[in-house]
Amino acid sequence: MSLIEEEGGKRINMAHLCIVGSHAVNGVAKIHSDIVKTQVFKDFSELEPDKFQNKTNGITPRRWLLLCNPGLAELIAEENKLKFSQFLEKEYRVKINPASMFDVHVKRIHEYKRQLLNCLHVITMYNRIKKDPKKLFVPRTVIIGGKAAPGYHMAKMIIKLITSVADVVNNDPMVGNKLKVIFLENYRVSLAEKVIPATDLSEQISTAGTEASGTGNMKFMLNGALTIGTMDGANVEMAEEAGEENLFIFGMRIDDVAALDKKGYKAKEYYEALPELKLAIDQIDNGFYSPKQPDLFKDVINMLFYHDRIQRPGTRWYSKIIAASGKFSSDRTIKEYAKDIWNMEPSDLKISLSNESSNGVYKANGK
Ligand SMILES: *Cc1c(COP(=O)(O)O)cnc(C)c1O
Protein backbone atom coordinates (compact mmCIF):
# COMPACT_ATOMS: atom_id res chain seq x y z
CA MET A 1 0.00 0.00 0.00
CA SER A 2 3.03 2.27 0.01
CA LEU A 3 3.00 5.26 -2.28
CA ILE A 4 6.63 4.54 -3.08
CA GLU A 5 7.68 1.61 -5.30
CA GLU A 6 10.84 0.10 -3.85
CA GLU A 7 11.78 -2.38 -6.59
CA GLY A 8 14.24 -1.23 -9.26
CA GLY A 9 14.73 2.19 -7.70
CA LYS A 10 12.29 4.43 -5.86
CA ARG A 11 9.34 5.59 -7.93
CA ILE A 12 5.87 6.96 -7.11
CA ASN A 13 3.03 4.44 -7.51
CA MET A 14 0.54 6.65 -9.30
CA ALA A 15 -2.47 4.36 -8.74
CA HIS A 16 -1.91 4.29 -4.99
CA LEU A 17 -1.39 8.05 -4.94
CA CYS A 18 -4.70 8.50 -6.79
CA ILE A 19 -6.60 6.35 -4.33
CA VAL A 20 -5.16 8.08 -1.29
CA GLY A 21 -5.68 11.53 -2.81
CA SER A 22 -9.26 10.99 -4.00
CA HIS A 23 -12.42 11.00 -1.96
CA ALA A 24 -14.09 8.44 -4.29
CA VAL A 25 -12.84 5.65 -6.51
CA ASN A 26 -14.94 4.27 -9.34
CA GLY A 27 -14.49 1.26 -11.61
CA VAL A 28 -16.85 2.65 -14.37
CA ALA A 29 -18.68 -0.70 -14.82
CA LYS A 30 -19.97 -3.13 -12.22
CA ILE A 31 -17.55 -5.98 -12.99
CA HIS A 32 -14.52 -3.72 -12.97
CA SER A 33 -15.57 -1.93 -9.79
CA ASP A 34 -15.78 -5.38 -8.17
CA ILE A 35 -12.31 -6.29 -9.44
CA VAL A 36 -10.96 -3.01 -8.11
CA LYS A 37 -12.42 -3.78 -4.67
CA THR A 38 -11.67 -7.48 -4.41
CA GLN A 39 -8.41 -7.81 -6.32
CA VAL A 40 -6.48 -4.85 -7.65
CA PHE A 41 -6.90 -2.54 -4.63
CA LYS A 42 -8.24 -5.02 -2.06
CA ASP A 43 -6.21 -3.61 0.83
CA PHE A 44 -7.32 -0.02 0.13
CA SER A 45 -10.93 -1.14 -0.13
CA GLU A 46 -10.71 -2.83 3.26
CA LEU A 47 -9.11 0.27 4.75
CA GLU A 48 -11.74 2.68 3.33
CA PRO A 49 -14.71 0.63 2.08
CA ASP A 50 -17.01 3.67 1.55
CA LYS A 51 -14.57 5.26 -0.84
CA PHE A 52 -15.04 2.54 -3.44
CA GLN A 53 -18.11 2.95 -5.64
CA ASN A 54 -19.53 1.97 -8.98
CA LYS A 55 -20.86 4.41 -11.55
CA THR A 56 -21.31 2.60 -14.84
CA ASN A 57 -20.45 4.80 -17.85
CA GLY A 58 -23.17 6.25 -20.06
CA ILE A 59 -23.71 7.75 -23.50
CA THR A 60 -26.26 10.33 -24.55
CA PRO A 61 -29.01 8.87 -26.74
CA ARG A 62 -29.63 12.32 -28.25
CA ARG A 63 -26.23 12.45 -29.92
CA TRP A 64 -25.64 8.74 -30.43
CA LEU A 65 -28.98 7.78 -31.88
CA LEU A 66 -31.25 10.63 -32.86
CA LEU A 67 -28.51 12.89 -34.20
CA CYS A 68 -25.99 10.42 -35.63
CA ASN A 69 -28.36 7.69 -36.83
CA PRO A 70 -31.62 9.22 -38.00
CA GLY A 71 -31.96 6.16 -40.26
CA LEU A 72 -32.33 3.83 -37.27
CA ALA A 73 -34.57 6.28 -35.44
CA GLU A 74 -36.73 6.33 -38.58
CA LEU A 75 -36.69 2.53 -38.84
CA ILE A 76 -37.90 2.20 -35.27
CA ALA A 77 -40.67 4.70 -35.94
CA GLU A 78 -41.71 2.65 -39.00
CA GLU A 79 -41.70 -0.54 -36.93
CA ASN A 80 -44.05 1.10 -34.42
CA LYS A 81 -46.40 2.15 -37.23
CA LEU A 82 -46.39 -1.37 -38.65
CA LYS A 83 -47.16 -2.89 -35.26
CA PHE A 84 -49.99 -0.45 -34.64
CA SER A 85 -51.39 -1.05 -38.16
CA GLN A 86 -51.49 -4.78 -37.45
CA PHE A 87 -53.22 -4.11 -34.13
CA LEU A 88 -55.84 -1.93 -35.86
CA GLU A 89 -56.42 -4.53 -38.57
CA LYS A 90 -56.95 -7.20 -35.94
CA GLU A 91 -59.10 -5.18 -33.53
CA TYR A 92 -61.03 -2.96 -35.95
CA ARG A 93 -60.86 -4.97 -39.17
CA VAL A 94 -59.63 -1.98 -41.17
CA LYS A 95 -56.79 -2.05 -43.64
CA ILE A 96 -54.20 0.61 -42.87
CA ASN A 97 -51.44 1.89 -45.11
CA PRO A 98 -48.45 1.90 -42.73
CA ALA A 99 -46.56 4.19 -45.09
CA SER A 100 -49.22 6.91 -44.71
CA MET A 101 -48.88 9.80 -42.29
CA PHE A 102 -50.41 8.85 -38.94
CA ASP A 103 -52.29 11.97 -37.93
CA VAL A 104 -53.48 11.37 -34.37
CA HIS A 105 -55.98 13.26 -32.22
CA VAL A 106 -56.62 11.28 -29.04
CA LYS A 107 -58.00 12.79 -25.83
CA ARG A 108 -61.39 13.15 -24.11
CA ILE A 109 -64.02 14.36 -26.55
CA HIS A 110 -64.81 17.98 -25.74
CA GLU A 111 -65.89 20.98 -27.79
CA TYR A 112 -62.93 23.04 -26.58
CA LYS A 113 -60.48 20.36 -27.73
CA ARG A 114 -61.99 20.81 -31.21
CA GLN A 115 -62.28 17.30 -32.60
CA LEU A 116 -64.95 18.97 -34.75
CA LEU A 117 -62.35 21.26 -36.30
CA ASN A 118 -60.29 18.19 -37.17
CA CYS A 119 -63.38 16.56 -38.65
CA LEU A 120 -64.02 19.61 -40.87
CA HIS A 121 -60.42 19.30 -42.06
CA VAL A 122 -60.92 15.60 -42.86
CA ILE A 123 -64.03 16.46 -44.89
CA THR A 124 -62.09 19.19 -46.69
CA MET A 125 -59.25 16.79 -47.55
CA TYR A 126 -61.85 14.31 -48.81
CA ASN A 127 -63.47 16.95 -51.00
CA ARG A 128 -60.09 18.03 -52.37
CA ILE A 129 -59.22 14.45 -53.37
CA LYS A 130 -62.61 14.08 -55.08
CA LYS A 131 -62.26 17.39 -56.88
CA ASP A 132 -58.81 16.69 -58.27
CA PRO A 133 -57.95 12.97 -57.97
CA LYS A 134 -54.72 13.35 -59.95
CA LYS A 135 -53.27 15.96 -57.62
CA LEU A 136 -50.41 14.84 -55.39
CA PHE A 137 -51.71 14.02 -51.92
CA VAL A 138 -49.60 12.78 -49.01
CA PRO A 139 -51.46 9.64 -47.87
CA ARG A 140 -52.89 10.12 -44.41
CA THR A 141 -54.47 7.96 -41.74
CA VAL A 142 -56.44 10.20 -39.42
CA ILE A 143 -56.94 8.58 -36.04
CA ILE A 144 -59.35 10.30 -33.69
CA GLY A 145 -60.06 8.73 -30.34
CA GLY A 146 -61.53 9.50 -26.96
CA LYS A 147 -64.43 9.00 -24.61
CA ALA A 148 -67.45 11.26 -24.16
CA ALA A 149 -68.86 11.90 -20.70
CA PRO A 150 -72.18 10.01 -20.30
CA GLY A 151 -74.41 13.11 -20.26
CA TYR A 152 -72.52 15.14 -22.85
CA HIS A 153 -74.80 15.05 -25.90
CA MET A 154 -72.67 17.24 -28.17
CA ALA A 155 -69.56 15.10 -27.53
CA LYS A 156 -71.52 12.01 -28.53
CA MET A 157 -72.77 13.73 -31.71
CA ILE A 158 -69.17 14.63 -32.58
CA ILE A 159 -68.21 10.94 -32.29
CA LYS A 160 -71.21 10.00 -34.43
CA LEU A 161 -70.15 12.55 -37.05
CA ILE A 162 -66.56 11.24 -37.12
CA THR A 163 -67.69 7.62 -37.60
CA SER A 164 -70.23 8.71 -40.24
CA VAL A 165 -67.58 10.63 -42.18
CA ALA A 166 -65.24 7.62 -41.80
CA ASP A 167 -67.89 5.34 -43.36
CA VAL A 168 -68.11 7.55 -46.44
CA VAL A 169 -64.39 8.29 -46.82
CA ASN A 170 -63.13 4.74 -46.14
CA ASN A 171 -65.54 3.19 -48.63
CA ASP A 172 -65.03 5.61 -51.50
CA PRO A 173 -62.98 3.81 -54.19
CA MET A 174 -61.83 7.18 -55.56
CA VAL A 175 -60.04 7.85 -52.30
CA GLY A 176 -58.37 4.46 -52.03
CA ASN A 177 -55.23 4.48 -49.94
CA LYS A 178 -54.93 8.24 -49.76
CA LEU A 179 -57.15 8.95 -46.79
CA LYS A 180 -58.44 6.71 -44.03
CA VAL A 181 -60.34 7.79 -40.94
CA ILE A 182 -60.33 5.67 -37.80
CA PHE A 183 -62.28 6.38 -34.64
CA LEU A 184 -60.36 4.77 -31.80
CA GLU A 185 -62.96 3.69 -29.26
CA ASN A 186 -62.31 3.02 -25.58
CA TYR A 187 -59.26 5.30 -25.54
CA ARG A 188 -57.35 4.60 -22.35
CA VAL A 189 -53.76 4.44 -21.09
CA SER A 190 -53.08 0.96 -22.49
CA LEU A 191 -54.25 2.12 -25.93
CA ALA A 192 -52.37 5.43 -25.62
CA GLU A 193 -49.21 3.40 -25.07
CA LYS A 194 -49.76 1.75 -28.43
CA VAL A 195 -50.83 4.70 -30.56
CA ILE A 196 -48.43 7.39 -29.30
CA PRO A 197 -45.21 5.66 -30.45
CA ALA A 198 -46.78 5.13 -33.91
CA THR A 199 -47.75 8.77 -34.39
CA ASP A 200 -46.26 11.10 -36.98
CA LEU A 201 -48.44 14.13 -36.32
CA SER A 202 -49.84 15.03 -32.89
CA GLU A 203 -53.03 17.14 -32.92
CA GLN A 204 -53.09 19.69 -30.04
CA ILE A 205 -55.60 22.18 -31.41
CA SER A 206 -57.66 23.55 -28.52
CA THR A 207 -58.81 27.17 -28.73
CA ALA A 208 -56.10 29.35 -27.16
CA GLY A 209 -56.91 29.91 -23.50
CA THR A 210 -58.96 26.76 -22.97
CA GLU A 211 -56.51 23.91 -22.27
CA ALA A 212 -54.84 24.31 -18.86
CA SER A 213 -51.75 22.33 -19.86
CA GLY A 214 -52.40 19.06 -21.61
CA THR A 215 -50.16 16.07 -21.03
CA GLY A 216 -50.89 14.16 -24.21
CA ASN A 217 -48.93 16.85 -26.07
CA MET A 218 -45.82 15.99 -23.98
CA LYS A 219 -46.16 12.23 -24.49
CA PHE A 220 -46.19 12.65 -28.27
CA MET A 221 -43.26 15.06 -28.21
CA LEU A 222 -41.19 12.61 -26.17
CA ASN A 223 -41.94 9.91 -28.74
CA GLY A 224 -40.72 11.96 -31.68
CA ALA A 225 -44.05 13.01 -33.24
CA LEU A 226 -44.33 16.47 -34.73
CA THR A 227 -46.99 18.68 -33.17
CA ILE A 228 -49.63 20.70 -34.97
CA GLY A 229 -51.16 22.96 -32.39
CA THR A 230 -52.34 26.26 -31.09
CA MET A 231 -50.54 28.52 -28.62
CA ASP A 232 -52.39 26.98 -25.69
CA GLY A 233 -51.53 25.16 -22.47
CA ALA A 234 -48.10 23.55 -22.37
CA ASN A 235 -47.81 23.82 -26.17
CA VAL A 236 -46.51 27.33 -25.49
CA GLU A 237 -43.63 26.00 -23.41
CA MET A 238 -43.00 23.14 -25.83
CA ALA A 239 -42.52 25.75 -28.56
CA GLU A 240 -40.22 27.67 -26.23
CA GLU A 241 -38.09 24.58 -25.55
CA ALA A 242 -37.96 23.15 -29.08
CA GLY A 243 -38.12 26.42 -31.03
CA GLU A 244 -41.40 27.55 -32.59
CA GLU A 245 -40.09 26.57 -36.02
CA ASN A 246 -40.05 22.93 -34.91
CA LEU A 247 -43.80 22.83 -34.25
CA PHE A 248 -46.65 23.62 -36.62
CA ILE A 249 -48.26 26.49 -34.72
CA PHE A 250 -51.45 27.96 -36.13
CA GLY A 251 -54.59 29.82 -35.13
CA MET A 252 -55.52 32.66 -32.86
CA ARG A 253 -53.32 33.62 -29.92
CA ILE A 254 -55.00 34.27 -26.60
CA ASP A 255 -55.13 38.04 -27.29
CA ASP A 256 -56.78 37.44 -30.67
CA VAL A 257 -59.42 35.29 -28.96
CA ALA A 258 -60.13 38.04 -26.42
CA ALA A 259 -60.34 40.65 -29.20
CA LEU A 260 -62.73 38.48 -31.19
CA ASP A 261 -64.88 37.86 -28.13
CA LYS A 262 -65.11 41.60 -27.62
CA LYS A 263 -65.98 42.25 -31.25
CA GLY A 264 -68.40 39.32 -31.35
CA TYR A 265 -67.80 36.01 -33.11
CA LYS A 266 -70.02 35.42 -36.13
CA ALA A 267 -69.63 31.93 -37.57
CA LYS A 268 -71.68 32.82 -40.67
CA GLU A 269 -68.98 35.25 -41.83
CA TYR A 270 -66.41 32.45 -42.02
CA TYR A 271 -68.92 30.13 -43.64
CA GLU A 272 -69.65 32.70 -46.36
CA ALA A 273 -66.00 33.64 -46.90
CA LEU A 274 -64.50 30.14 -47.18
CA PRO A 275 -65.96 27.96 -49.97
CA GLU A 276 -64.32 24.73 -48.72
CA LEU A 277 -65.67 25.29 -45.21
CA LYS A 278 -69.11 26.07 -46.65
CA LEU A 279 -69.08 22.83 -48.64
CA ALA A 280 -68.08 20.78 -45.58
CA ILE A 281 -70.80 22.29 -43.40
CA ASP A 282 -73.43 22.00 -46.13
CA GLN A 283 -72.59 18.31 -46.58
CA ILE A 284 -73.04 17.67 -42.85
CA ASP A 285 -76.28 19.70 -42.90
CA ASN A 286 -77.84 18.04 -45.93
CA GLY A 287 -77.26 14.45 -44.86
CA PHE A 288 -74.38 13.60 -47.19
CA TYR A 289 -72.74 11.69 -44.32
CA SER A 290 -76.01 10.40 -42.83
CA PRO A 291 -78.24 9.56 -45.83
CA LYS A 292 -80.60 7.42 -43.73
CA GLN A 293 -81.17 10.27 -41.29
CA PRO A 294 -80.42 13.55 -43.08
CA ASP A 295 -81.10 15.76 -40.03
CA LEU A 296 -78.94 13.66 -37.69
CA PHE A 297 -76.38 16.43 -37.21
CA LYS A 298 -78.72 19.42 -36.88
CA ASP A 299 -77.57 20.04 -33.30
CA VAL A 300 -73.95 20.14 -34.44
CA ILE A 301 -74.80 22.66 -37.18
CA ASN A 302 -76.80 24.80 -34.75
CA MET A 303 -73.97 24.76 -32.25
CA LEU A 304 -71.50 25.85 -34.92
CA PHE A 305 -73.63 28.79 -36.06
CA TYR A 306 -75.53 29.99 -33.06
CA HIS A 307 -73.61 29.21 -29.90
CA ASP A 308 -71.12 31.51 -28.30
CA ARG A 309 -67.54 30.55 -28.58
CA ILE A 310 -66.93 27.44 -26.52
CA GLN A 311 -65.79 28.18 -22.99
CA ARG A 312 -63.18 26.16 -21.18
CA PRO A 313 -64.62 23.55 -18.82
CA GLY A 314 -64.90 24.38 -15.10
CA THR A 315 -62.25 21.98 -13.87
CA ARG A 316 -59.91 21.63 -14.95
CA TRP A 317 -38.01 6.04 -31.38
CA TYR A 318 -38.21 3.22 -30.12
CA SER A 319 -37.47 -0.64 -30.28
CA LYS A 320 -36.76 -3.06 -27.46
CA ILE A 321 -33.04 -2.45 -27.88
CA ILE A 322 -33.44 1.22 -27.26
CA ALA A 323 -35.82 0.67 -24.36
CA ALA A 324 -33.18 -1.59 -22.84
CA SER A 325 -30.54 1.06 -23.37
CA GLY A 326 -32.36 3.31 -20.92
CA LYS A 327 -30.05 2.34 -18.11
CA PHE A 328 -27.14 3.56 -20.18
CA SER A 329 -28.39 7.05 -20.60
CA SER A 330 -25.81 9.51 -19.37
CA ASP A 331 -28.64 11.33 -17.60
CA ARG A 332 -28.65 8.54 -15.05
CA THR A 333 -24.84 8.41 -14.83
CA ILE A 334 -24.51 12.15 -14.30
CA LYS A 335 -27.28 12.19 -11.72
CA GLU A 336 -25.49 9.47 -9.75
CA TYR A 337 -22.16 11.26 -10.01
CA ALA A 338 -23.74 14.48 -8.83
CA LYS A 339 -25.46 12.87 -5.86
CA ASP A 340 -22.88 10.33 -4.67
CA ILE A 341 -19.52 11.64 -5.82
CA TRP A 342 -19.63 15.36 -6.45
CA ASN A 343 -22.09 16.03 -3.61
CA MET A 344 -23.90 18.57 -5.78
CA GLU A 345 -27.47 19.78 -5.55
CA PRO A 346 -29.48 20.20 -8.77
CA SER A 347 -29.30 23.77 -10.05
CA ASP A 348 -32.22 25.63 -11.57
CA LEU A 349 -29.83 27.35 -13.96
CA LYS A 350 -31.26 26.92 -17.45
CA ILE A 351 -28.97 25.75 -20.24
CA SER A 352 -30.30 26.17 -23.75
CA LEU A 353 -29.45 23.27 -26.06
CA SER A 354 -29.08 25.67 -28.97
CA ASN A 355 -26.11 27.22 -27.13
CA GLU A 356 -24.29 23.91 -27.32
CA SER A 357 -21.12 24.52 -29.30
CA SER A 358 -20.20 22.67 -32.51
CA ASN A 359 -22.73 20.34 -34.06
CA GLY A 360 -24.39 19.06 -30.92
CA VAL A 361 -27.58 21.02 -31.58
CA TYR A 362 -30.59 18.82 -31.00
CA LYS A 363 -33.75 19.51 -32.96
CA ALA A 364 -37.17 17.96 -32.42
CA ASN A 365 -37.51 14.65 -34.27
CA GLY A 366 -33.80 14.63 -35.10
CA LYS A 367 -34.41 16.63 -38.27
C1 LIG B 1 -52.35 11.54 -21.36
C2 LIG B 1 -53.72 11.04 -21.47
C3 LIG B 1 -54.80 11.94 -21.52
C4 LIG B 1 -54.62 13.43 -21.49
O1 LIG B 1 -54.52 13.85 -22.84
P1 LIG B 1 -54.63 15.40 -23.23
O2 LIG B 1 -54.22 15.41 -24.68
O3 LIG B 1 -53.68 16.14 -22.36
O4 LIG B 1 -56.05 15.80 -23.05
C5 LIG B 1 -56.07 11.43 -21.63
N1 LIG B 1 -56.29 10.09 -21.68
C6 LIG B 1 -55.28 9.20 -21.66
C7 LIG B 1 -55.60 7.74 -21.74
C8 LIG B 1 -53.97 9.64 -21.55
O5 LIG B 1 -52.97 8.74 -21.53
Image (spheres, rainbow, N blue to C red):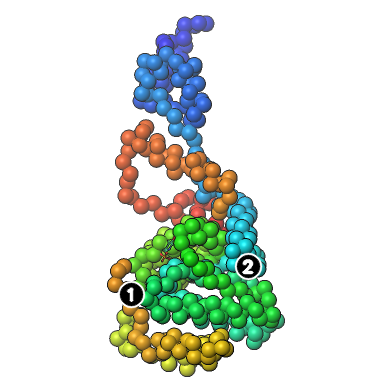
Residue at x-position 40% and y-position 61%: 215
SS at mark 1 in the image: loop
Q: Position of residue 181 (x, y in %)?
A: 58, 74
Between 248 and 306, the one lying in front of the other is 306
| Quarter of the rendering occupied by the C terminus | bottom right
281 vs 138: above or below:
below
- For disc 1, the neighbor class at 10 Å (few under 14, some 14 to 19, many from 20) is some
Q: Nearer the viewer, mark 1 or mark 2?
A: 2
| Disc 2 CB within 8 Å of nearest ligand 1 atom | no
* Marking on residue 312: 1
Residue tagged 2: 93
> Residue 179 is drawn in which quadrant?
bottom right
First in sequence: mark 1 or mark 2?
Answer: 2
| Disc 1 CB within 8 Å of nearest ligand 1 atom | no
> What distance separates the C-alpha of mark 1 from that of mark 2?
36 Å
Residue type at tag 2: Arg
Count of marks overlaid on the render: 2
Residue at x-position 32% and y-position 84%: 261
Between 81 and 4, the one lying in front of the other is 81
Can you see residue 206? no
- For disc 2, the neighbor class at 10 Å (few under 14, some 14 to 19, many from 20) is few
Q: Is residue 226 left or right of residue 209?
A: right
For ligand 1, the image quadrant comes to bottom left
* Marking on residue 90: none
Q: Position of residue 79 (x, y in %)?
A: 62, 56
| Quarter of the rendering occupied by the N terminus | top left
Residue at x-position 35% and y-position 37%: 339
SS at mark 2 in the image: loop
